[in-house]
Image (cartoon, grey):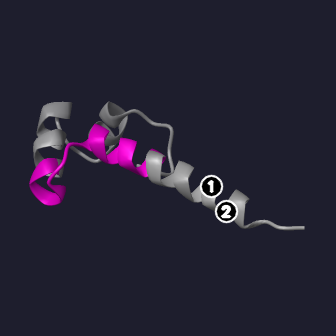
Amino acid sequence: MAATDKTITQIALESGYPNIKAFTAAFKANFGIIPTQYRKILKETAAIEDTSADNDLEI
């Protein structure tokens, strides 16, 4: 999910789930959060890492 711009619905259908509700239920059962929360955390983490990497650069 981090490496794609596909919607959660697209990912669900391409993964063989009949609908977003089934995918969300399975995802939450496995990871403890829903897919949109997971994607948000990934984006926030990436932003923090990018900022941290920029701060490490010294000339």
- Where is residue 19 shown, x and y percent of the image? 18, 32
Q: Badge 2 is on which residue?
A: 53
Q: Is residue 35 a member of the stretch shown in magenta?
A: yes
| Residue 30, picture quadrant | bottom left
Query: Which secondary structure, mark 2?
Result: helix
Q: Residue at x 20, y 32 (%)?
A: 20
- Name the residue located 12 percent from the left edge and 39 percent from the top edge: 22
Q: Classify 31 as above or below 43.
A: below
- Dot 2 crowding, Cα within 10 Å, few <14, some 14–19, many 20+: few
Please provide percent x and percent y for residue 4: 50, 45
The magenta-colored residue range is 28-43
Does 4 appear above or below 59?
A: above
- Residue sitting at the far right: 59
Q: Position of residue 17 (x, y in %)?
A: 19, 41
Q: Which residue is mark 1?
A: 50
**Prevailing secondary structure of the magenta residues:** helix
Q: Is residue 4 left or right of residue 20?
A: right
The residue type indicated by label 1 comes to: Asp
